[in-house]
Amino acid sequence: MFTALRLPLMGLLSFTLAQAAVAADCAPVQQHGAEVFANECGVCHSVTKGAVGMMGPNLAGVVGRKSGSLEGFNYSQAMRSKNIDWQAENIEQLITQPQAYVPGTYMPYMGLASAEDRQAVVCYLKEQH
Ligand code: HEC
């Protein structure tokens, strides 16, 4: 009886561990992230280093950059005073609901409802240097 119980439990445990490994690894979602970026962000943001003239700041190298700090971009006062370093976690928070995360931001974006899409697009941004 004990073995009969233990086997399904072991199966469940290794399944859960495999899921966690996938969540931490960006590689499998890069393609999806690129698509989400093109559909949701690309109209306002470029990831081509040095490209200017779009409504939003260039996002090449945004992971690890201080918020509101790109030279030559006219940020809102709200973004300039946010004073954080952009990392996967807080970019995901920003794009969940920009106006809630940075009240008064100029980013006129309603938010990305799917957590899976948010994670994928941030994975994509990590690769844009
Ligand atoms: C309709 C235009 C628009 C869309 C769509 C948009 N953004 Fe933005 N974004 C902006 C603007 C404008 C700012 C500057 C905000 C400010 O100064 O308050 C900004 C700022 C940002 C910043 C802060 C950058 C910095 O230098 O501090 C990040 C990160 C960002 N956007 C990511 C995204 C992502 C990811 C998406 C897609 C899920 C997205 N944005 C969609 C216009 C947009």
Image (cartoon, grey):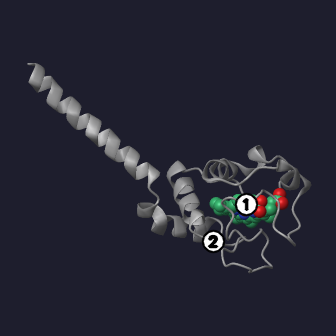
Residue 45: percent from left, percent from top: 71, 71
Q: Disc number at residue 65?
A: 1
Identify the residue position indicated by label 2 in the image: 129
Instruction: Return the residue found at the far right.
Output: 77
Q: Position of residue 115 (x, y in %)?
A: 54, 49
Q: Amino acid at mark 1?
A: Arg
Q: Are marks 1 and 2 in contact (CB under 8 Å)?
A: no
The residue type indicated by label 2 comes to His
Q: Is residue 119 left or right of residue 93?
A: left
Q: Which type of secondary structure does the marked residue at label 2 adopt? A: loop
Residue 4: x %, y % from top left: 10, 25
Q: Which residue: 85% across, 69% down? A: 73
Compared across the picture, whether 63 is left or right of 104 comes to: left
**Residue 15 sits in quarter:** top left
Ligand 1 near label 1 (Cβ, under 8 Å)?
A: yes
Q: Residue at x 79, y 48 (%)?
A: 102
Q: Residues within 10 Å of mark 2 (few under 14, many from 20)?
A: few
Does the rendering let one see residue 108? no
Left or right of 92? Residue 123 is: left
Determine the residue positioned at 65% across, 49% down: 96
Q: Quadrant of ligand 1?
A: bottom right
Residue 48 appears in view: yes
Mark 1: few, some, or many residues within 10 Å (few <14, many ≥20)? some
**Above or below for 31 versus 85:** below
